[in-house]
Image (cartoon, rainbow, N blue to C red):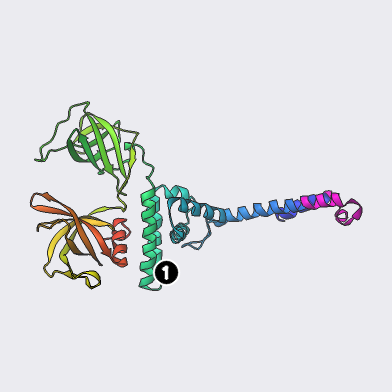
Amino acid sequence: MTLLNVLLTLYLLQVDVSDFWKKQDSSSNKESLIILIFIIVVVAVIIFLTSSRKGSGSGSGGKGSTGLFARLALHRMGRDIGLNGEQIKMLDFVFRTDQVLDPEKSIVTPALLDRHFRRAYRVIEQTSKTDAEVQYRHAVLFSTRNMLESNVSGGISSTRQLKDDTSVILNNGKEKYEVLILSTTGENLALECPQNALGSSVKLQKGTRLSALLFTKNNKGFSFETHVTGYTTVHGRNALLVAHSNKLKFLSQRRFRRRQMVIASNLYLVYVEGSGKKQRLIVDKRRLTGNIADISVGGCSIKAKAPIQVGARMKIEFTQGDYSVAALGQVLRTNRAGMVTIVHIKFLKVSRKSMNIINAFVYEYINE
């Protein structure tokens, strides 16, 4: 017997049903009918909510339902973040695919988000009928992930939450030193000993106040204040000890996640010929070579031996494993590092497929 039947039985045991059709007490009949309708509505809502909660964990491979109220809450969160209708639908698909029971927790936890999106990436490859459909759905998937990336801080508030080998820039007055985190355990944060431009170790006095800047693996920028507490040895390496901070400040960041990679690339200068509607781009046949040092869908940095002028347009090509990428970019700035020029390039035109490949590399959804 259902809950609804039980309640109706208990109610009818106390009420004479024939009273509903007696003309002499119509007001009492109306009150009884209203009460009965109210009970039915309440029970129906209870049954609906119970079935919604059960449905939230059912199914596999994106077939389950997250429940009406959970989906409404997810859509509201998506709109607050700035997702459009297509991206909200994709987020719903991602969470249903991985049977996510707590979307709010996943949205503020980058590691969980990447796990959900990585599985959805593979499901799209397996279920799409054509390559064009794969590329379109992957493009929406990554545009959604990038929007979430730029709107979620990752919940980091203490240096104890940082990962080993994270790069940190220490500022001591006008001097800047880039070091790696060796260990976050213990009473102090252990860092590589800083070095000057000649590669010699720099000895900082105990108590020296420092400001620090860092970017996590998922490209979240943070700053904090600290001071030198001493020196020690970590894993056989000399380490600078600084005080932990529980006041990390979340900084504005690059628009897209960036990943450090070493990828051999070919570069071709691109010239503009003609003007107006007759304008066209001419790719120089002479090939320059370099190594990509970091990359995002917005641009890349390349280490090249040939001198390259700021403002130059270039075609960048590279192959990594089974994947080939081509993009048109423009040089924003250059830096000399010994015999090498570091060229910072902004992408001007990238095909949808190449953009999806770059995103998949950056988010580590595919192997190189």
- The location of residue 249, given as percent across then percent down, is 33, 38
- Between 161 and 36, the one lying in front of the other is 36
- Between 351 and 282, the one lying in front of the other is 282
Report whether 284 appears left or right of 20: left
Quadrant assignment for the C terminus: bottom left
- The location of residue 258, given as percent across then percent down, is 27, 53
Amino acid type at mark 1: Thr
Is residue 140 visible in the rendered image? The answer is: yes
Q: Which residue is at the far top?
A: 207
Count the marks: 1
- The location of residue 243, given as percent across then percent down, is 28, 31
Which quadrant of the structure image shows residue 300? Answer: bottom left
Q: Measuring 36% from the left and 55% from the top, which residue is drawn there?
A: 146
- The location of residue 17, given as percent across then percent down, is 85, 55
Residue under circle 1? 127
Which quadrant of the structure image shows residue 216? Answer: top left
Label 1 SS:
helix
Report whether 150 appears left or right of 55: left
Q: Give the range drawn in magenta.
A: 14-34
